[in-house]
Amino acid sequence: MTLTDTHTHLYYLYGTPDLAIQMQRCFDNDVRHFLLPNVDSESIPKVLGTAAAYPGSCYAMMGLHPCSVKTDYLDELATIEQIIADNKIYGIGEIGIDLHWEKTTLPLQQEAFRIQTRWAKDLGLPVSIHCRDAFDELFQLLDEVQDGRLRGVLHCFTGNSQQAQRTIDLGLHLGIGGVVTYKNAGLDAVVANLDLRHIVLETDAPYLAPVPYRGKKNESSYLLHIAQKIADLHGVTLATVAATTTENAKRVFGI
């Protein structure tokens, strides 16, 4: 059995003994593939270093996180664009819109999103999209930029059934993480009615740990609990969820 974490920041541990310790726990839990979303220019060395340390398991993505979009965002994007030209990457991300922490940068976030989705389409790469308190704004942008070439994942999906279908209709997969295990989140009911072919798994480690670790620091080895919850919701085996979602991830990211 092979599980694939399509969105993890485990590279934050690069350069520490904890990285090898957590990776071994992942392998012990059959979590064998990891997509690493960049957030800004400072995280680039850790993303690339982790991917180089675990070839065939860890895969680099490059992008500018919406919370990192400041007045110097064009300089940040220029740095990231050069890294993309010089390195093998598997996606553009983490990009998107976040109106939870900062609303005044929305115009900058929107332009950064347009630029990065254009990279993705021109390079034939998928996107990993962050959306927090911004579904309407994101869908408006996606309607604008989707020309049939944009593909990827709406990561950490926490929306309702209508928003899930809208995402699928836009040609994107849904990244399902620890929130699906939270009792009152309501995501379990949404996921129960989704075809598994539209789902990929993720942890967003070190954030949003699933039950039974909720409230603690998350790690990619906990993907097993997310997969088991989805298996229970669909009345299928854990192996079925692992196989289907890993094939989805391979198809989206080309790993």
Image: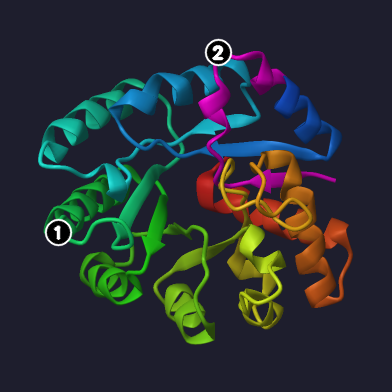
> Would you name the residue on which mark 1 appears?
104
Q: In this rendering, would 121 be left or right of 7?
A: left
Looking at the rendered image, the quarter that the C terminus falls into is top right
Along the line of sight, the residue nearer the viewer: 14 or 114: 14
- Could you say which quadrant of the image residue 32 lies in? top right
Q: Please, which colouring scheme is shown? A: rainbow
The 10 Å Cα crowd at callout 2, few under 14, some 14 to 19, many 20 or more, is few
Residue 192 falls inside the magenta stretch: no
What amino acid is at disc 2?
Gly
Q: In this rendering, would 90 be left or right of 71?
A: right
Could you tell me residue 141's position as x and y percent? 24, 68
Which residues fall within the magenta stretch?
1-20
Q: Residue furthest bottom?
A: 162
- Could you say which quadrant of the image residue 43 lies in? top left
Residue drawn at (20%, 32%) of the image: 76
Could you tell me residue 236's position as x and y percent? 87, 71
| Mark 2: secondary structure | loop
What amino acid is at disc 1?
Thr
Q: Residue furthest right?
A: 237
- The label number, if any, that marks residue 173 in the structure image: none
Residue drawn at (61%, 37%) of the image: 34
> Would you name the residue on which mark 2 appears?
15
Q: Who comes first in sequence, dot 2 or dot 1? A: 2
